[in-house]
Amino acid sequence: MKDYSQTTYDAVDLLSRLIATPSISREEKAAADLLEQTLQTYGIHPQRKGNNVWAVAPYYDADQPTLLLNAHLDTVRPVSGWQHDPFTPTLEDNHLYGLGANDCGGGLVSLLFAALPWLQNQAEPLPFNLIYLASAEEEVSGHEGIESVLPLLPPIHFAIVGEPTGLQPAIAEKGLMVVDAEAHGRAGHAAREEGDNAIYAALRDITLLSNPHNGLFTQVSPLLGPVKTSVTIIHAGTQHNVVPDRCAYTIDVRSNECYTNEAILQILSTHLESTLKPRSTRLSSSGISPDHPFVRRCESLGLQPFGSPTLSDQALMHFPSVKLGPGQSARSHTADEYIRLDEIEQAVALYHTLLTSPMPLF
């Protein structure tokens, strides 16, 4: 294995300990304890709410703007098919395997070690305040995650979110709305010509949703493409000889910035027969202008802005933000998830370069 910087080894050591500390969404306490204790060993005085841990660089000045560095502690549950133990960090040929290594442990530790000199007050103050936040419940968009912490922080002017993007800046991301739909019919005996089959009513709606040329959402985003609707769950019927009077199904909606989730719900309600109930409308699409100073700085370093189809805590940030982190989104939520050590080393270096930029970032 090639040699890496001591900072990289320190980051990998912390990430390995986090992998060995299960942190399924809403079960992050042990991982939050570990991170809190680690910050304390570095002479940092973290703050905490629930399973969210954060630290403010000591030179804080209310007259300066504030940059938030954020990544999440929690993971999804391990899927089947792992060849490695998901909770045993395994280093093989530059690859660190383990649940959360890629999503979002690589970004979590890389942001921390890039910011460490300022969090420890061992570097010249930056022209902005710096806050590092490890948040909980991101994978479930839980109310006890970043949403519960933001009101406790000073006003944030910009955020870097350490999700896996191949170290390219995602300057827009799709939103999410999950809709529970129910088609209604009338029960009857399957042997006779009676009843009104709710499955067939649901199929009419599902067929419309599955048609990419249905004309429901005509506005297409240059970065995010069209609004995408997918029916992902369906339930109906009680026994083979009864015409079902109800058919429930779930619609996964990925919104672009051209529509609010409320507007999408109104369009769906107008064109579908089924009754619709959104689980939440708060996870909207987000993005910043391609002309934003942070984007221009990234481009000056040879990075390529893009639009991300996946959701993150950016949806809950009511201030400009960019998703930028080591690893690849395609590895997330998969068996044998991994991060490469060189990706962590490159991420720490890139974050440091951005933090010390001679160009304004926001």
Image (tube, grey):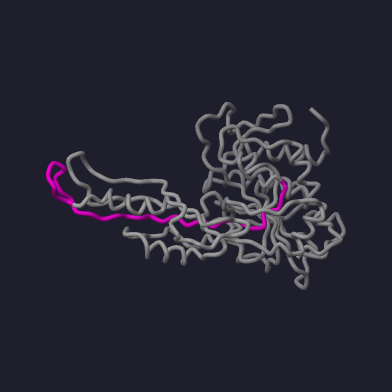
- For this view, does 98 lie left or right of residue 279? right
- For this view, does 65 lie left or right of residue 267? right
Image quadrant where residue 237 sits: top left
Instruction: Give coordinates of residue 180: x percent, y percent.
Output: 38, 55
Image quadrant where residue 56 sits: bottom right
Residue 210, magenta (yes or no): no
Observer-nearest of 225 and 340: 225
Q: Is residue 154 above or below residue 44?
A: below
Residue situated furthest front in the rendering: 213
Residue at 40% from the left image edge and 61% from the top image edge: 268
Residue 190, magenta (yes or no): yes
Instruction: Give coordinates of residue 76: x percent, y percent.
Output: 53, 43
Q: Quadrant of the N terminus?
A: top right
- For this view, does 298 lie left or right of residue 236? right
Q: Is residue 181 above or below residue 242?
A: below
Instruction: Give coordinates of residue 333: x percent, y percent.
Output: 56, 40
**Start and end of the magenta stretch?**
167-195
Q: Is residue 257 above or below residue 2?
A: below
Observer-nearest of 271 and 242: 271
Image quadrant where residue 238 sits: top left
Residue at 43% from the left image edge and 51% from the top image edge: 211
The answer to whether residue 116 is seen in the rendering is: no
Q: Quadrant of the C terminus?
A: bottom right
The answer to whether residue 237 is seen in the rendering is: yes
